[in-house]
Image (tube, rainbow, N blue to C red):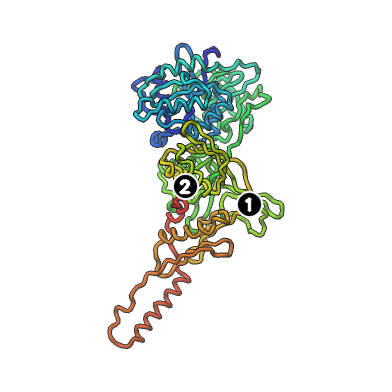
């Protein structure tokens, strides 16, 4: 295909603004998919994506329209996958910005617009769902005009569900999106914007060829991981794999390789040919590091091997997933896994439970902390249980995020209150039409559990939130431990700011009192910082009436039997074991 006839574009939008539905209509209109094979959200292949209504794994597809080759990349909308989105944008020349006509601009719309502008893409504004009774075309149009500085007439008004106005979108893509720039380099370079592992074929890469050409059977090399492989098959996705002879400069397609794991071919890496390697990689590659960690334990220890095998299989496709074995005296053997964010964690948990039929206990998510010791050594810990002796620590640094919340004007007060209750600092406040954009900074650990739920409830569901990692800051952090019947329970330990330790300790022991069943002896629940106890609750013992068999006679007989019972309870208290139910370990997740 002549380069002037190629148009590479993607669709960016907030979650649930109709991105995948618009992709369906484009596939129908260009005749890429037969009517009989069509189904809703065709590019969302996972059941989980269809149920949640979100795109988790991006999908490229090639369409033909009036002699033009249109390459579409359907990108994920969630903040956890923003690095993947940035790589997809790097593979395109244009982007459709889809905004819901009833909801207007949301936090991730803004974040994605900034990413698209940084990648120097031509933006085509599209207002979707104009057929809804709640659609407010004038207001949302004004918001888009304010954001992009375009004219109201430039905004395409469509309904992706009914297909109204979608033909105009195709016309605009052909007319406005620039063709790929002609390649001047002699060596071959291609950008990997996604990769996944297929059980039968090995690692499959989705690539955009920037310079040169990659043919079937070529020996390829990854620039950053230095892995070598073979291009067993190359071709385009229409939307199923259609093999071809080669991929030329400007084209988007797939390469089936003989690599065994996606860790050899990470998103953002540059592919070059082994016999004529490129001297410089394409810009923008970074090694994505997880910053949310949680312990995953099987319901029974006999399923530990199944859990380990399942996670190893998932990690073949997901290079961001990192895991190490973990052992807890209460929960037995498990795995500590690192994730890109809370949605990523949620998806992995659901996939393990569904695809591998595992019953899981997930401990409280935590983040990583950087620790400087007095000896000058620097260490990284992923869980509170790994904290070294406090006497050897000079300072502890925790990750802070830069966040942006978009809400209707009336909710600004409660939102600022919520931010300050999480030790956050509001840094800026601006207005777009009748919406407020609240910029803030906050410690990541305080947003891990229920921040998003609280935001949704105080803003009646209108608030949207987007964040990125800012830096690590030294804070007065301590490890809060919990004791049950005098025994420390390592899986419950958390890192917390000293000012919040007392409140969190009190709340947690109160909740533990509700979930731990009563025993035949009194059980003490305590929260402690180092050797100092800061909160306590007691679970009172069951009392069996041992005097029922006595009738008449001297009161001393009664006292004797009660004294014997008291002696037995004392002994039980020393040797008795408390059975801690699984829900005690997820108690921090449900703080309210």
The foreground one among 188 and 507 is 507
Q: Which residue is mark 1?
A: 396
- At which x and y percent is residue 152? 47, 21
Direction bottom: furthest residue: 554
> Helix or strand or loop: what does disc 1 sit on?
strand
Q: Bin the neighbour count of mark 2 within 10 Å (Cα to Cα): few under 14, some 14-19, many 20 and up.
A: some
Q: Is residue 57 visible?
A: no
Q: Earlier in the sequence, mark 2 or mark 1?
A: 1
Q: Residue visible at 46% across and 41% down?
A: 411
The image's mark for residue 423 is none
Q: CA distance from mark 2 to mark 1?
A: 24 Å
Q: Which residue is mark 2?
A: 450
Q: Is residue 292 visible?
A: yes
The foreground one among 481 and 254 is 481
Question: Relative to residue 159, is residue 4 depicted above or below?
Answer: above
- At which x and y percent is residue 567? 43, 78
> Helix or strand or loop: what does disc 2 sit on?
loop
The foreground one among 404 and 479 is 404
């Amino acid at each position: 295909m002549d380069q002037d006839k190629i148009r590479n574009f993607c669709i960016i939008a907030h979650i649930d603004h109709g991105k995948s539905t618009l992709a369906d209509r484009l596939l129908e209109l260009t005749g890429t998919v037969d009517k009989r094979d069509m189904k809703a959200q065709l590019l969302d292949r996972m059941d989980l994506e269809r149920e949640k209504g979100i795109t988790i794994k991006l999908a490229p597809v090639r369409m033909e329209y009036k002699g033009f080759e249109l390459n579409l990349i359907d990108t994920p909308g969630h903040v956890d996958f923003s690095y993947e989105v940035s790589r997809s944008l790097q593979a395109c020349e244009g982007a459709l910005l889809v905004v819901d006509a009833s909801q207007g601009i949301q936090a991730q719309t803004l974040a994605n617009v900034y990413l698209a502008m940084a990648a120097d893409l031509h933006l085509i504004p599209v207002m979707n769902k104009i057929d809804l009774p709640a659609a407010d075309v004038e207001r949302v149009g004004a918001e888009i005009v304010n954001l992009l500085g375009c004219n109201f007439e430039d905004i395409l008004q469509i309904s992706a569900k009914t297909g109204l106005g979608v033909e105009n979108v195709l016309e605009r893509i052909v007319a406005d999106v620039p063709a790929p720039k002609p390649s001047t380099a002699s060596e071959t370079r291609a950008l990997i914007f996604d990769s996944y592992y297929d059980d039968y074929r090995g690692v499959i890469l989705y690539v955009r060829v920037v310079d040169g050409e990659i043919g079937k059977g070529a020996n390829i090399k990854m620039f950053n991981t230095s892995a070598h492989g073979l291009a067993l098959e190359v071709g385009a996705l229409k939307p199923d794999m259609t093999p071809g002879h080669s991929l030329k400069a400007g084209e988007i397609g797939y390469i089936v390789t003989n690599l065994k794991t996606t860790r050899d071919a990470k998103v953002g890496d540059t592919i070059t040919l082994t016999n004529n390697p490129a001297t410089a990689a394409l810009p923008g590659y970074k090694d994505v590091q997880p910053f949310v960690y949680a312990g995953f334990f099987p319901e029974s220890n006999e399923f530990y091997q199944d859990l380990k095998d399942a996670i190893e299989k998932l990690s073949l496709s997901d290079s961001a997933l990192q895991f190490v074995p973990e052992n807890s005296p209460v929960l037995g053997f498990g795995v500590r896994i690192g994730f890109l964010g809370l949605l990523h964690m949620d998806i992995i948990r659901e996939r393990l439970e569904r695809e591998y039929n595992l019953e899981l206990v997930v401990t409280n998510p935590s983040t990583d902390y950087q620790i400087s010791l007095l000896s000058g050594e620097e260490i990284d810990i992923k869980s509170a249980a790994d904290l070294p002796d406090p006497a050897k620590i000079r300072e502890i640094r925790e990750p802070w995020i830069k966040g942006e919340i978009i809400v209707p004007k009336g909710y600004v007060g409660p939102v600022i209150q919520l931010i300050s209750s999480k030790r956050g600092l509001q840094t800026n406040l601006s207005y777009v039409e009748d919406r407020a954009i609240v910029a803030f900074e906050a410690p990541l650990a305080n947003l891990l559990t229920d921040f998003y739920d609280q935001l949704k409830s105080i803003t009646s569901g209108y608030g949207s939130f987007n964040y990125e990692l800012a830096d690590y800051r030294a804070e007065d952090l301590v490890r809060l431990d919990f004791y049950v019947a005098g025994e420390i329970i390592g899986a419950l330990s958390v890192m917390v700011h000293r000012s919040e330790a007392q409140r969190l300790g009190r709340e947690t022991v109160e909740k533990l009192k509700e979930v731990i069943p009563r025993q035949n002896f009194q059980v003490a629940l305590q929260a402690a910082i180092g050797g100092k106890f800061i909160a306590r609750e007691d679970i009172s013992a069951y009392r069996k009436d041992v005097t029922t068999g006595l009738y008449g006679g001297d009161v001393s007989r009664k006292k004797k039997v009660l004294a014997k019972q008291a002696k037995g309870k004392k002994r039980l208290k020393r040797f008795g074991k408390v059975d801690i139910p699984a829900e005690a370990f997820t108690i921090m997740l449900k703080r309210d």
